[in-house]
Structures are given as structure tokens and as C-alpha cells.
Image: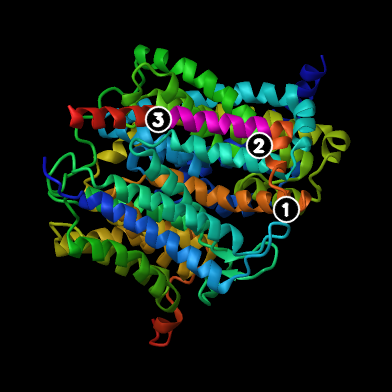
Amino acid sequence: MSSRVNVKEVTAGLLCIVIGGFFALQSVTTLPIGSARQIGPGYFPFAVGLILIALGILIGLRAVQPAESSDRMQFVSVRTMLAILASPVVFGLSVRPLGLAPAIVITALVATLAGNRANVVQSLLLAAGLTIFCVAVFSYGLGLSLPLFGPLLARFGV
Amino acid sequence: MELLSNLALGMEAAVTPANLMYCFLGAVLGTLIGVLPGIGPTATVAMLLPLTFTLDPLASLIMLAGIYYGAQYGGSTTAILINVPGEASAAVTALDGHQMARQGRAGPALAIAAIGSFIAGTLATFLVALMAKPLTAVALEFGPPEYFALVTLGLISSVALAHGSIVKALAAIAIGILFGTVGADLYTGAPRFTFGVIELTNGFDFVAMAIGLFGIAEILRNLEGTQATSLVAKKISGLMPTRADLKASISPIFRGSLIGSAIGILPGGGAALASFLAYSVEKKLSDQPERFGRGAIEGVAGPESANNAGAQTSFIPMLTLGIPTNPIMALMIGVMMIQGIIPGPSVAVEQPTLFWGVIASMWVGNMMLLVLNLPLVGLWARLLLVPYSMMFPAILVFSAVGLYTINSNSFDLYTVSMFGLLGYVLYKLDFEPAPLLLAFVLGPMLEDSLRRSLMLSQGDPSILFTRPISATLLAATLLILAVAVLPFVRKKREVIFEEEA
């Protein structure tokens, strides 16, 4: 029987210890803990942080048992990950300066970069379709008072 | 019979052609908006709220009830079809509902959700009418220690939902509670863990967190490796539930209705806790608990019924005490105030027509839902046949626009990406997002009730164990934890024995 440590479980344990440690440390250093009679803002997150650290250690200890299956974990590709995580951020950054319609176009185009078979014509058609649909539903259907074209574009006379 | 005369009074007020039309309109709009991925019931109700301002008080509350039920059903639809629950209570529906959809059984899942909701709504309406007075008296008995015990019970119950490790589920709860503490402290106003970010003063946005943890993480999972062309592996077979489906669902529907009604009445309990509990109960009662999480229809029927019954009875604390039990109830109170009604004990006495009219309108709203959605099940299920390469950009765009409409706050969108990444990492490490999300919602309540309890007892923690209601609730919590941990310990011992042998 191999004594190889289960990497997944160790990572899981470490993640708990890091998150718990972060909150516990921040509570102690930046917030008043208070007393049992009048507990302060730091008391509760400090206690829960400690519990999470304890749970993390427990998970880590059990990881000493070898992994049940040795098959490698499969991850999403870096390009897909970046494109998916970037698209809400891109919308958040662009919706105010550029307005709703351009923001949707950009967000949709960024999102389609995540697909394996990104096809330029298909992506543009999808972006156009989504923009028309969203503008119809949100701006006209729900009467959302978001400018379709933002101040940055208005300056150029759009 | 006081009950029947009260309900008759309510029906008389609610069932006029004009009010029926408003209710129907509300249900249609609520479903249409609620079915868009990433837009949960709270967002839907908030967006449609302005439509009701011009109506008279009863009509506006009736239309709002229609919107609410429509939105909730729409939320369940997206939970089932694309695993994007709009709120905590639908997260439970997604567990088995989405698995059913993947197996080509989206139709039966959606139909049973509608049927279960309707039966639960009917039962809960009668229960509300019957129990409104005595239950209000019990709810009034609840002090901070009882709230603390109730929330603890709810959180520990959600551990029973986890497929895998109990320790990891407990850790997920702790993580959720910690994320819930971010923002200004309730008592001192001290900013906690905000690092000077003004947008974090009110904490992380629940919807943003839910979209990230469930929606974005789900998209990332689906895009791993070779991409399937559409979400359904198998053909969609049979839109309506079979006789066997109905038979399997009927008991869960009734149990769910009872659990939901009981939990929903407790201020702070609400629909989310009810659906989590109902799911745990069904899993525990089942002969084949291993089917849960893999497309068990009971796992859709029970929680959906509980969810709806809980939503209904959560009107009781709202109407009688003026306490909102969830964000939607808070919106309802807002509408009542705009209409010049101050929610509180006086409403039932001074405006019985309105009080009972609203209760009756819940049932009318549920019926509208059934009439509207059963014929449309096929349409919703067909959404799944859209190729995933077109689906996921659409989900991302709808989520982004929908989320932005709630607070007009770009920061929420950055939150989505952050929690999307966290959700994916947690999934890869076998943590479950559902207990985390529940803990995020209930965490602040847990802290608040703990602090108030300790203030009450001047720092003596025994107050939590000595009051009868809270002692009973905490004992039940220990029991559930023991039941959940025991098989796990036994299995581990077996593993140890095997290694020694």
C-alpha cells in the first residue's frame, strides 16, 4: 500500500485553514473582541474562524490515507476560465461609460471566446441577437432606466 | 366555523374578474422574467414592483402575489434546466431537478414542481387560515436563544444534504458564515473585513454570490474537456410525469407541505430552510438514499412543496408582526407602506377583508401557476436543446444584466467572478456550495441572536440550553448531527479494520 498523500484532501484542508486563519487573524488584529457579557464585532468571526481552522486540520489529517482513485483531475482550460470569469467584470466596467447595448455586445463576445469552436460570424450573430433581446426585455419591457449608449460614446456623437 | 367564514370573506374579495386578471398578469410576467437565467425571484419581484403601485391596496397585493409565485416557479425552472437557482430555496430543487433534466426528464421535473407547489399552496392556505392565531402566539414566544437554536438546527440539517464528507460540509457552513460577516457590524457599525471597499459595507450581494457559486461554477464545469453540444445527454422523453412518478411524489408533496408550513411561520425560518429540511427528510426516509442527488423525483417534489408552503406561511409573521422573513417579504412590506397600510397585529382586526383577501389570493396565485405552466412545460424543456456554445454566453449576459438591474452596482459583477472561481475550486475539492450559501444567509441571524442572548443573560451561555424551546431545538440538532456522523464513523472503522486485516 502506497503512503502517497492525497493531494486533493490536503489542498481542501489548507484552503479551510487559510480562509479560517485569515478571518480569525483579521478579527483579532482589527476588531474589538469584547467580553462574554458584551461581545464585540470581532468575537463571532474569530470563533467561527477558529472552528474552520480546526475542521481544516481534520480534513488534512484524513488526507494521509491514500487517494481512492489515482486518476488525474481534469480542469477547465486557462483560456476558458479567463474568458468566463472576465465577462461579468467586462460588463461591470463597460456598462456605465459605454451604455447597456455596447456592454452587452462586448460581454457576449468575451464569453464566446471560452468555447472550443469559437467562430467569428457565429459569435457576432449571437452577440447581436442577445443585445436585441436584452434591450427589448430590460429597456422596453421592464422600463429599465439604463442609457443604451453611455456618456463616453455620446461625446463622439453616437 | 370562523375559519370558513374568514376564507369566504377573503375569496369574495380576491375572486373578482379584475383581481383575477391582475393575478394572472402577475403570474405571467413573473414566470417570463423569472425563467431568465440569473434572475431570481427577488430580482423579478423588485423589477416588477412598480407595475403595482397604481392599483388599489388589495389588487396590488394580489398582483404581487401572482408575480411572486410566477417568479418562484420561474426560478425553479432555471434551477432544474440549467442548474442556476435564483435563491437559496431553489438550490435544493437544483440538486435532483437538474440531474433529472440531464437524464432527459426535465418535463416531469417541471410538472411535478408545479403540481407539488399547487397542492402545497392549497394545504398551506387552509393551514394559514386555521393556525394564524395560535401560531402567532407561539412565534411571539421566540426570543434570541430560540432563534439561535432554530438557526443552528437549520444549518446542521443542511449537512445531511451533503453527498460526501460531513467534515467538509461543516467547513462549507463555516466558510459561508464567515463570508456573511463581511460588512458593517450590526451593533457598532464597525466595518468588518471590508478593506476600505465602500461597496462591501452592506456585505456581499446574495444574488451575486449565488450566480457565482452555482451559475458560473456550473458553466466552468460544463466547459471542461470535450464539450457536449447540448446539456441533455439523452433525448427528452415524456413531458408529463408517469403514474410511477406521481405515486413516488405524492407522499413527499404532503410531507413537504407540512414541513414548509411549520418552518415558514417562524420568523427567520422562511422558505429556504423549509426546502432544505424537506430534502433531508425525504433522503432519510427513502429506501434508496443513494438515488438522491442523481435525479430522484422525491428530491424535487418534497422541497418544491415545502418551499411553496413555507413561502405562503411566511406571510403570517409579515402580516401579523410586520417582520419580513426574506427579502421578498421586505418588498411586500414596502408595497403595503406605499399603500398606506402599516403591517402589524392591527391589520387582521381592522382590515379583515385585506388580511383574508391576501391569504385567499395566494391560493388563486397558485392555481394561475398551474394553469399557466403545465401547458408550457414542453416549451421550457425545449430550451435545453439549444446548443451549449450559444447557451452559456446567453446565461452570462442575462446574469450580468439582471444582476446590474438590482443595485446598479458594478462591484456586484466583480463579486460574481470571485465567487465563480471559488465555487469551481470548491467543486474540484468536493465541497458543496448549497450549505455554504445557506450559512451565508443565516449567519448574520446566528450572530445577532447569539449576541442578544448573551446580553440577555449577562454573558451566561447556559441561557441557550435552559429555555425549553431552545433546549428542544438544540437537542434535535445534536440528534441530526449524530445520525449524520454515525454511518460515517462506522464506515471509517471498517476501512481501518480492512487495513489491519
Q: Which residue is mark 3?
A: B110
Q: Which residue is mark 2?
A: B314
Display coloring: rainbow
Chain part drawn in magenta: B471-485
Image height check: is B169 above or below A139?
A: above
Specify the amino acid type for callout 3: Leu
**Callout 2: few (<14), some (14-19), or many (20+) C-alpha neighbours within 10 Å?**
many
Q: Residue at x 41, y 70 (%)?
A: A92
Q: Chief secondary structure of the magenta span?
A: helix
Q: CA distance from mark 3 to mark 2?
A: 24 Å
Q: Which residue is mark 1?
A: B459
Q: Position of residue A91 (x, y in %)?
A: 38, 68
Q: Position of residue B282 (x, y in %)?
A: 45, 23
On the rendered image, what quadrant is the C terminus of chain A found in?
Answer: bottom left
Q: Secondary structure at mark 2?
A: loop
- Locate residue A53: give its quadrant: bottom left
Specify the amino acid type for callout 2: Ser
N-terminal of the pair, mark 1 or mark 3, is 3
The foreground one among B471 and A101 is B471
Tell if the residue under mark 2 belongs to the same chain as the one under mark 1. Answer: yes
